[in-house]
Amino acid sequence: MASVATVFGFLLIMVVNTVLAAVAIRFFRLRLSTTWGAVVYTAVLIPLLYLATTILLSGFIGFGGSGVEDKGTALILVWVLPFTLAVSLDVFWMPSPEEVDLPDRAS
């Protein structure tokens, strides 16, 4: 049985990872001119963000509990679920990049 602190820690890590991934994916889709560029940056950089936040929050700060029995379930909870939710937020609920007006760059 998981303690309340462990559940709270996992929820905190999931929320932080979801917000970071949603913001990063949106940034990549708006700023990069090609579709494949956004996909490649998302596939490479989001796991690096997840690695940093997971090490920071579960290692140094101690959220998520150290006595996790099933590592596969923990990985799904803190990496796969937030990534899937962030992608679905950007694809289904945010306007497409063609509909967004970006400010002109100052030169």
Image (spheres, rainbow, N blue to C red):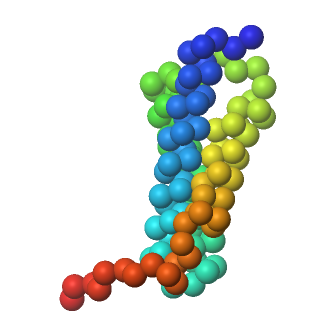
Give the image quarter of residue 69. top right
In the image, is residue 40 above or below residue 3?
Answer: below
Q: Report the front residue among 15 and 39.
A: 15
In the image, is residue 76 above or below residue 87?
Answer: above
Left or right for 69, reference 54: right
Residue 98 x/y as whole percent: 52, 84
Residue 20 x/y as whole percent: 49, 51
> Residue at (60%, 18%) from the top-left corner?
6
Whether residue 91 is visible, yes or no, is yes
Residue 55 x/y as whole percent: 53, 35
Give the image quarter of residue 39. bottom right
In the image, is residue 81 above or below residue 77?
Answer: below
Identify the residue at the far bottom of this view.
107
Left or right for 71, reference 95: right
Left or right for 104, reference 14: left
Residue 27 x/y as whole percent: 46, 67
Say which quadrant the C terminus sits in. bottom left
> Residue at (57%, 84%) from the top-left corner?
34
Say which quadrant the N terminus sits in. top right
> Residue at (54%, 39%) from the top-left corner?
15
In the image, is residue 8 above or below residue 19?
Answer: above
Identify the residue at the far left of this view.
107
Whether residue 43 is visible, yes or no, is no
| Number of on-image labels | 0
> Residue at (60%, 58%) from the top-left corner?
89
Q: Report the front residue among 3 and 72.
A: 3
